[in-house]
Image (tube, helix red, strand yellow):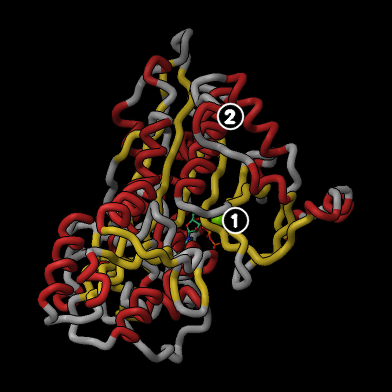
Amino acid sequence: MRLSRALIPTLKETPAEAQIASHRLMLRAGLIQQEAAGIYAWLPAGLRVLNAIANIVRDEQAGIGAQEVLMPTIQSADLWRESGRYDAYGPEMLRLKDRHERDLLYGPTNEEVITDIYRHSVKSYRELPQMAYQIQWKFRDEIRPRFGVMRGREFLMKDGYSFDLDYAGAVRSYRRIMLSYMRTFQRLGVKAIPMLADTGPIGGDLSHEFIILAPTGESEVFYDAAFEEIDWSGASFDVDSDADLERFFQTITGHYAATDEKHDTAAYEALPEARRRTGRGIEVGHIFYFGTKYSKALNMTVAGRDGQKLHPEMGSYGIGVSRMVAAVIEASHDEAGIIWPDSIAPFRAAVLNLKNGDAACDAMAEDVYRRIGVRHALYDDRDERAGVKFADADLMGHPWQVVIGPRGAAAGRVELKRRRTGERVELTVEDALARIQESV
Ligand code: ATP
Ligand code: MG
């Protein structure tokens, strides 16, 4: 992408309405634009990040056999009357009427619709377990939308659902999801800690929130720093092995982590002091086992092994995809701007031409831009001072900056800057391209 033609409206001034770093930086880096309270348009650079996160989520869901579906945003009120939630949900639900005066709603979550889908198609224990998910916009008329996309009214959520024959199966599904989430967050470059959450009337220990530490988080959290060192990816845990899932869950529950609601001071203080971590946390995911609550209410049955009719055991599993964009920025920025992890950066590298119009600089910048790939590089070809280009590249947070000036162009060399460390090295074009390629 050429910056001179890009819809990336960067701002020098700090927008007055933004109270936290991620909101300020998302507006200043031209990622989003507010259209109404808690409702945002995603501009090209912001959408690239959102899509990159969604694709990592998809890949890890595929890794545990979860199937992607797409359910409607507009749902029938009748379905929610069946579950009893139409009246119970309260003012966060956006209620609509169509031209025939039929009640509709904009989905705040999808347990009813997914159960409706499965009750039509799955009839036998032989077809279980099943897992499906979608990445779809939700609307919740939050009383206090704030902090940009962190707490929006319209927001993008990955919501997944599992159907099992019995409790043991539901536990297995829950653990598989949990492992896939740890891997997802690791690939997103964030340290999300699973914390025991309230299970309400169902009880048990099968609800966890996944929390990223950041000073602007909404809840206070406490956890064992050993969590940060665990590698969830690769061969350490096989999602198809019950023994591995058990060892995985023991690893999770064997390390202290709790929000203030569930905090146990004695257990926390039993940790060696150096391993105690406390701070504010942002909830980026939440998983939940709820048994037959919806399968019973919506009368979904499958034939069991002996022909008896059973209500499947269900769970639901969310990741705040749009909130994640803000959460990553909260966890990864400095005074100059965003510092994107390689895995979700809108562009792998910015190419900064310090002397537009200079034949050697233009030729070299074009060449570097094309060789990184026009899909992956942002070429700053604007007629702007070097200082402006440096500042904007730092603000936008590209993992790499390839700086091209007249002296280097004459010698066939560029300056390569790593945004995260600030390290700058002078290299040949080939070496610079190789370094960028290695980090992908
Ligand atoms: P919160 O406690 O933050 O209000 P929640 O518990 O109501 O969230 P869930 O129903 O668990 O949310 O939704 C799953 C995920 O969706 C949450 O973990 C969060 O990351 C994200 N999410 C929920 N509400 C919002 C919102 N208003 N704006 C952006 N993301 C949200
Ligand atoms: Mg939640």
Front-most of 271 and 425?
Answer: 425
Q: Is residue 301 left or right of residue 9?
A: right
Q: Is residue 104 visible?
A: no
Which element is circle 2 on? helix
Report which residue position mark 1 lands on.
211
Q: Which residue is at 10% across, 76% downward?
A: 359
In this rendering, the answer to whether 34 lies above or below 316 is: below
Check contact, mark 2 vs mark 1: CB within 8 A: no
Q: Residue at x 46, y 46 (%)?
A: 187
Q: Nearer the viewer, mark 2 or mark 1?
A: 1
Asked if residue 13 can be seen in this view, the reply is yes
- Ligand 2 found in image quarter: bottom right
Identify the disc placed on residue 9.
none
Question: Could you say where residue 278 lies in the image, as x and y percent from the top left?
Answer: 74, 61
Q: Amino acid at mark 2?
A: Val
On the rendered image, what quadrant is the N terminus found in?
Answer: bottom left
Q: CA distance from mark 2 to mark 1?
A: 21 Å
What residue is rendered at 58% in x and 52% in y?
A: 192
Mark 1 secondary-structure assignment: strand
Q: Which mark is residue 171?
A: 2
Is ligand 1 less than 8 Å from the beta carbon at label 1? Answer: no
**Within 10 Å of the Cα at label 2, are there few (<14), some (14-19), or many (20+) other Cα atoms?**
some
Q: Quadrant of residue 276?
A: bottom right
Closer to the camera in the image, 288 or 45: 45
Count of marks placed on residues? 2
Give how far across and how far down residue 414 sits, in percent: 29, 66
Ligand 1: does it lie within 8 Å of the C-beta at label 2? no
- Residue extending furthest toward the top: 306
The residue under label 1 is which amino acid type?
Answer: Ile
Residue 37 image point, x, y percent: 39, 80
Residue sticking out furthest to the front: 411
Q: Is residue 8 above or below residue 372?
A: below
